[in-house]
Image (cartoon, rainbow, N blue to C red):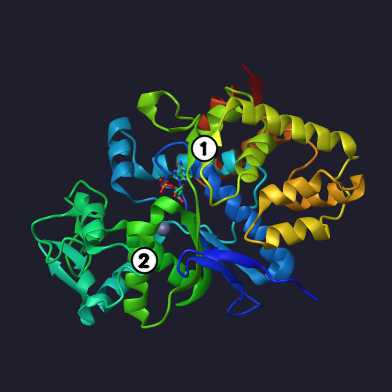
Amino acid sequence: MQSDLTLYNSLSRQKDVFKPIDANNVRMYVCGPTVYDFAHIGNARPVVVFDLLYRLLRDKYGSDHVTYVRNITDIDDKIMNRAAEENIDIMTLTQRTTEYFHADTDALGVLRPNHEPRATEYVEQMIGMISTLMEKEYAYATEGHVLFHTPSMEDYGKLSRRSLDDMIAGARVEVAPFKKDPTDFVLWKPSDNEQMGWQSPWGYGRPGWHIECSAMAGKLLGDTFDIHGGGIDLIFPHHENEIAQSCCTTGKPYVNYWMHNGFLQINGQKMSKSLGNFFTIRQLLTEKNIAGEVVKLLLLRTHYRQPLDWTDDGVTECQNILEKWFSKIEDISEVKAGLPEAVKNALYDDLNMPAAIAEMHHLSPEDLARCLKFLGFEKTLRTGKLSEADIKALIDARNQARADKDFAKSDAIRDQLLEDGVHLKDTRDGTSWTRK
Ligand code: AMP
Ligand code: ZN
């Protein structure tokens, strides 16, 4: 008998037994990074947590029967500002940052999603949705903007269950004189001629952030899908607004299970640049020389819904745990990944990783090897230093990009290698490299 997978659903506020709409195609969407800078260690938490869920779903339903979408937000005011500051074009910035994100998350040993849609490639879908919302009178155009009118939706606020006052306070940054209601939110906004934008029925402009996810998720996963995830900060307004846009467009439910990871702090304090406790994944891997597996274990060993405190002691503890586990097992390259029953039971209880780890300490070497492989802990401790094979692969990718005349990409790869101290030299016989 298959045991039930239960997941805490932010919508029902309880642990629900997971029942997919279609067991042949279980569908999950997770909000991905806004690509203007290196991902910080807080951003790595949803990546690692939903990777764990993805692995469980693939195991339960079959690896060809799960579709995991994690978007790339590549149009946003922060991106436009950063590109202007650095005097580079937006595509160069977003492509370079996306490559960094891939390299950093690969170093954590997480699987790539099945689709990584970029918002700029779905603007047509966004305009289509906004047009439908206008036709159905859920939205109105004013001063070049299109706004969603929240009182037009009966159960607006059902995910966050906030009071109207809270919602107004939460939305305050966006309160503009042309809004009919303070909680109305932007679907489309005008761009000036120098800014990135698209032609639309409401003039030259660009989409609001919320509609991006609704459009990408709807296009790739259908009107109603199984799981939607992200950090807890996204419940309001982002996910609340996604529900409003999608349900009002399609007239159907949007998502059955909403899942949110808690926030990561550093030594009990909110991470912030001004406090000097802000770390990117890359800094931890390279400057602090912490192995990707150690980072991942630290991110997983606290239950995903709890706040997570990142400390130096935690790093040492995770390092010790992994060293102990790795010392018990032989090479796992040939091992068949699998979940021992006790570990599976723990993880099926709303991804109870602390309980799973407690079980892992008692496994036989054989079971431990299968389990570590399942979770994506290979028997290495990868640091940020690129291996020779990594470097060769990147050089090949760069040469391919140059052959395709995609110089933004080839430059981004060269910059990425430089970040890791690898210098390239192009000669008539090919590309050689040296480490600084
Ligand atoms: P952003 O690029 O800010 O939109 O964030 C990308 C993802 O990282 C979202 O799912 C956020 O909820 C999540 N996130 C951002 N900061 C933290 C943090 N300190 N702890 C946990 N998750 C975070
Ligand atoms: Zn989103």
Tell me the crowding category of disc 1: few under 14, some 14 to 19, or many 20 or more residues within 10 angstroms, Cα based: many
Residue 297 visible from this viewpoint: yes
Looking at the image, tell me whether mark 1 or mark 2 is earlier in sequence order: 1
Task: Check the picture and name the quadrant holding the C terminus.
Answer: top right
The answer to whether the residue bearing label 1 lies less than 8 angstroms from the nearest atom of ligand 1 is: yes
Q: Secondary structure at mark 1?
A: helix
The answer to whether the residue bearing label 2 lies less than 8 angstroms from the nearest atom of ligand 2 is: yes
Q: CB atoms at circles 1 and 2 under 8 Å apart?
A: no
Q: CA distance from mark 1 to mark 2?
A: 25 Å
Q: Secondary structure at mark 2?
A: helix
- Which residue is at a point 43% across and 74% down the rendered structure image? 254
- In this view, the residue in front, 241 or 145, is 241
- Which residue is at a point 75% across and 61% down the rendered structure image? 345
The residue under label 2 is: 242
Instruction: Give coordinates of residue 2: x percent, y percent.
Output: 77, 74
Instruction: Give coordinates of residue 164: x percent, y percent.
Output: 23, 63
Amino acid bearing label 2:
Glu
- Which residue is at a point 82% across and 38% down the rendered structure image? 325
Instruction: Give coordinates of residue 404: x percent, y percent.
Output: 53, 47
Amino acid bearing label 1:
Ile
Task: Check the picture and name the quadrant holding the N terminus.
Answer: bottom right
The residue under label 1 is: 41
Instruction: Give coordinates of residue 371: x percent, y percent.
Output: 80, 51
- In this view, the residue in front, 205 or 359, is 359
